[in-house]
Image (cartoon, rainbow, N blue to C red):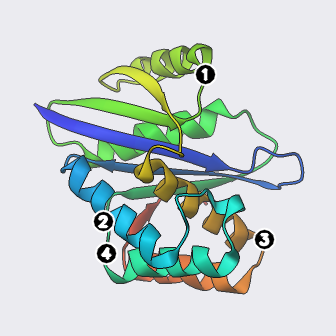
Amino acid sequence: MQKLYAYVDESGQDPRSDFFVVAAVVNDKSQDALRKQLIKAEEYAKTHGLKWHKTAHARRMRYLGYILERNIAKGNVYVAYYHKPLPYFFPMIEVLEQSIKLASHGKYRANIYVDGIDKYKAKKLTNALRASGISLRAVKSRRDESEPIIRLADMWAGCIRSALLKNKDTQELFDRGLEKGYFYNLTKT
């Protein structure tokens, strides 16, 4: 049975945002090897393990540029963006359902980690995913402070939101990632 790991973060819950972005990193490879690569990227970019909004713009760009150049997690990053207003849960369910189905091969069991989700919401998300046919134990919370893979999802969510807000640097980075086939854009057009 395939063992999948999904790490999810979002950007755009604040009322000032016109977009809600969800990014998921889903794979069945060694999580420790991926963590080591991401920590090396953070050291190179001097992001100090911080989230998108707490990191200087130049360091964000250096980090994501390094990730793209070295194809770290290439083909394992799934993103989607939505116009607001909309409920928080629907995009999360949609991205998780689609990304897990794309990443799975035959029988699988998914381990899903969502940045900072509380127990009540985690239980609701678990039940919704099971109802949609996803095989999982339970959605669990992981803090970005302790999980480099969540920080990768956070950085892509922040980058894409910034690109949607017409920031030239982040638009170029997002376009480059699409051209390279780095991630799957699950956005419905």
Task: Give the x, y percent position of residue 33.
Answer: 22, 57
Label 3 Cα crowd, 10 Å radius (few <14 / some 14-19 / many 20+): some
The residue where tag 4 is placed is 71
Q: Amino acid under label 2? A: Gln
Q: Position of residue 150 (x, y in %)?
A: 47, 48
Asked if residue 108 is positioned above or below residue 77 in the image, the reply reads above
Q: Is residue 79 visible?
A: yes
Please give the residue where the numbered disc 2 appears in the rendered image: 37
Mark 1 or mark 4: which comes first in sequence?
4
Above-or-below relation of 177 to 169: above
Q: Quickly name the residue at label 3.
A: 165
Tell me the SS state at disc 1.
Answer: loop
Q: Which residue is mark 1?
A: 118
Q: Decide if residue 20 is on the left or right side of residue 186.
A: right
Q: Residue at x 46, y 68 (%)?
A: 42
| Three-letter amino acid code of the residue under disc 3 | Leu
